[in-house]
Image: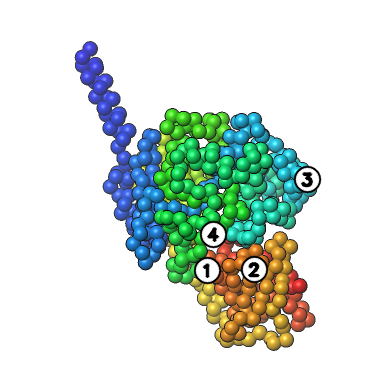
Amino acid sequence: MLLKKLAAVCVTLLFVQLSFAQPSFISDSLDNYVKRGMKDAQIPGLALAVIKDGKVVVMKGYGVRELGKNDPVDENTLFMIASNSKLFTATSIAKLEAEKKLSLDDKVSKYIPRYKVYDEDVSRMITIRDLLSHHLGTKTFQGDFTFWNSNLSRQEVITRMRLLKPVQQFRKDFGYCNSCFLTAGEIIPVVSGMPWEKYIEENIFKPLGMTNTYALTKDIETRKNVAVPYTNTFGQLAKLPFDKIDDMAPAGSIVSNVKDVSKWLMMQLDSGRYEGKQIIPWSAIQKTRDINTVLSSRKFGSAPTHIRGYGLGVFINDYDGRMIYWHTGGADGFVTNTCFVPEEKLAITILTNNDNQNFFEALRLQILDAYLGMSYVNREANEFRNIQAAEKETQASIKKLQDRIKNNMPDKSRDFTGTYTNNLYGNLTITKGTDNKLQMKFEHHPLLVGTLEYMDNNEFMTTYSPIAYGIFASKFKVENGKVISVEIKVNDFIEYDPYVFEKK
C-alpha cells in the first residue's frame, strides 16, 4: 500500500512538473526570435503575453515606444488594438441576449427604425447576427475610406451605409464590414440605456480589472506609456499621427496593453469566468464561437488548417486538430492579434507599432506550434520573404510614377482645380499649390492632404500626408477639353477600390 501511495505521489509530481514545463522555444529561444524578427521587420516596439493553464507564463515588452527615445515597451504600454475590439462588441450583445434584452435574430430595424442598406429587401431582413457576421454582401473594407478616421458622426456613418452597393450575395458571401459592427454596437444603447463605450467599461473592463484600458481613441496621445504608430509601406519608416476612430468605435477603437488583454483572454479560457466570478454567461461566450459564416472547408496552404469560419467578432479554424479562436487588428501604425485555444488552455496576444509587417502573426503561429508540439518551421522567415516581395512591388510602382513626372506640364486650357463630389464620400477640393503642384483636401478628413504632381495623359502622382494613405496616380477624365471627374486611390489597408469624384 505504501509503495502504491509513493507511486501515486511521484506520478502527481511528474504531472505538475510537466504541466508547468514550457516548450524549449518559449524557455530558450523566444527572446532571440522576437528581437531578430523586430529587426528584420523594422518594428520599434512589441508587447507579448502568453497564458497557459490559467497562469500568465510570458508577459513582457521589447523595443521602444518611440524611435529616438529610450522609453521601453513593457506590459503596461498602450497600443490601439483596433479590430480586436470587435469581440468585445459581440460579447456585449451576446450577454444582452442571455439577459433576454434582445435576440441576435432580431431585425436591425426593430432598434434603429430608419436603418436602410442599398437593397430594400435586405433592409427589411437584416438582423443583428448578420451585422456581426459580415453578411451584408459588400466587399471587405467597402466604405472605409469615407468612414475610417473621419469627422462623421456614428449616425452619419450608419445613414451612409445605404449607399454601399453590394457586389456579393447577402448572407452567402463574406465581406469584412466595419460599419456593420458600428451599427450593431449602436443597438447597445437602445436596449441598455448606456453608450457602447460605457457599457463595455461597466460590464467587461471593470469586472476584469482592466484598469488601464480605454474604449475610445480620444486623447490617446496624452496618455502615459503609449506606443507611437509607424509605417514603412511607402518608403522609410515614418511616424504617423494617431488614428481617431471613435465614430467607428464598436468596430475598433479600444486602446489597451498586454497586461489587461491577458485578463480578457483568461476569461475566454475559463468559460466566461475570471478569478472564480462569472463575468459573461457561458451561453453568451458559446454564441460568439458558433460559426455563422463558413470561409473555407479546404486545406489552407501549408498550415495544419482545413476549416475556417467567422463567429461573432472572432475567426475560427482548426489547427493541428484543435479549434482556435483569433482576430487581428489594424490601425494606421499598429497591427495586433489575440488568440485562444480552450482545449489547450492556451492564449496569446501580441501588440506592435509598425503596420507594414506580418511578424506579429508569424510569432503567434510560432508560439502555437511550440505548445502544440509541432515540428519547427521558421514562420518569421516565410513572412519576411512575403513582406519583402510586397515592398519591392510597392516601391517599383512608386518608381514608375516618379519616372513619369519629367517636369511635364498639363495643358493650360484645362482647369483641374475646383470642388469635386462623390455620392458616398462628399466633397474634395483641389487648389493650386507651389512649384506647379496641386493640393487636394477632403471634407471629412481635415488633416488629410494630397500633393499632386503632373505626369502625363491627365494623370497626377498623388502623395498623401499622412503617408499611411499612400502614393498613387490620380486620373482625371477630360471631355472636349473640360475636366469632368477625378479617380483617386488610397492604401489598400484602408480601402481596396478607388473613388470617382465628379467635378461640380
Tell me what residue is drawn at x 25 percent, y 22 percent.
9
Q: Is 40 located above or below residue 398 in the figure?
A: above
Tell me what residue is drawn at x 70 percent, y 46 percent.
170
Question: Is mark 3 in CB contact (under 8 Å) with mark 1?
Answer: no
**Residue 196 position in % (x across, y down):** 60, 44
Question: Is mark 3 in CB contact (under 8 Å) with mark 4?
Answer: no
From the viewer's side, name the closer residue of 62 and 142: 62
Disc number at residue 121?
3
Disc number at residue 467?
1
Mark in front: 3 vs 4: 4
Q: Is residue 201 visible?
A: yes
Tell me what residue is drawn at x 56 percent, y 73 percent.
463
What element does badge 1 sit on? Answer: helix
What element does badge 4 sit on? Answer: loop
Among the two numbered marks 1 and 4 on one chain, the one whose residue lies closer to the N terminus: 4
Tell me what residue is drawn at x 78 percent, y 81 percent.
480
**Residue 191 position in % (x across, y down):** 66, 38
Disc number at residue 243?
4
Q: Residues within 10 Å of mark 3 (few under 14, many from 20)?
A: few
Among the two numbered marks 3 and 1 on one chain, the one whose residue lies closer to the N terminus: 3
Mark in front: 1 vs 4: 4
- Measure the alpha-carbon separation of dots 2 and 1: 15 Å
- Measure the alpha-carbon separation of dots 2 and 4: 16 Å
Q: Residues within 10 Å of mark 1 (few under 14, many from 20)?
A: many
- Measure the alpha-carbon separation of dots 1 and 4: 13 Å
Among the two numbered marks 2 and 3 on one chain, the one whose residue lies closer to the N terminus: 3
The image quadrant that residue 474 belongs to is bottom right
Mark in front: 3 vs 1: 1
